[in-house]
Amino acid sequence: MTNLTLAVPEDLHQIMLKHKEIKWTEVARQAMWEKARKLELMDKLLAKSELTEQDAEEIGHKIKHGIAKRHGLVK
């Protein structure tokens, strides 16, 4: 198994120190696996996609505009 060193903000470190009963390396490992699984799923879903990055950006802009409009932030 490969070792990984990471930096955490001081306030998070203080919480971690208060809860030494938690195996923080296991918490980090599980969080990374969860993110990796989601990325793998996304890769599989997008593998056959014909959308370009520009298409995706345009769709994202339209969605954001629609949400802003629904909440009265734009006309």
Image (cartoon, rainbow, N blue to C red):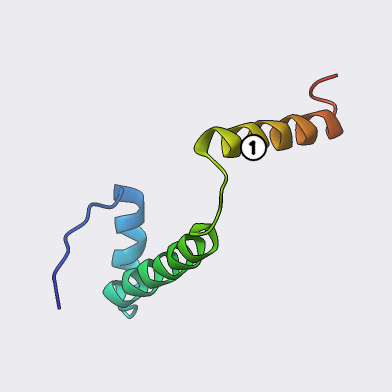
Residue 26 visible in the snapshot:
yes
**Residue at the image point whose x is 54% and y is 32% from the top:** 54
Compared with residue 1, is residue 5 higher up or lower down, i.e. above or below?
above
Residue hosting label 1: 60
Residue at 74% of width from left, 29% of height from top?
Answer: 65
The residue at the point 36 percent across, 67 percent down is 32
* 39 or 55, nearer to the observer: 55
Q: As drawn, is 15 to the left or to the right of 44?
A: left
Q: Give the residue type at disc 1.
A: Gly
Q: Tell me the residue at 13%/69% (across/down).
A: 3
Q: Nearer the viewer, residue 62 or 6?
A: 62
Count how many numbered circles sit on residues in the image: 1
Residue 58 as seen in the image, left or right of residue 44: right
Q: Quadrant of the C terminus?
A: top right
Residue 47 location in percent, x, y?
48, 59
Residue 3 as seen in the image, left or right of residue 35: left
* Residue 20 shows up from this direction: no
User: Splitting the image into 4 quarters, where does residue 30 fall?
Assistant: bottom left
- Left-right relation of 44 to 11: right
Q: Residue 68: percent from the left, percent from the top?
A: 77, 30
Q: Quadrant of residue 14?
A: bottom left
**Residue 56 location, quadrant:** top right
- Classify the position of the N terminus by image quarter: bottom left
Label 1 sits on a secondary structure element that is helix
Task: Decide: is 69 above or below 21.
Answer: above
Q: Nearer the viewer, residue 69 or 45?
A: 45
How many neighbours does mark 1 have within 10 angstroms: few (below 14), some (14-19), or many (20 or more)? few
Residue nearest the observer in this picture, 1 or 9:
1
Where residue 26 appears, as percent x and y from the top left, is 31, 77
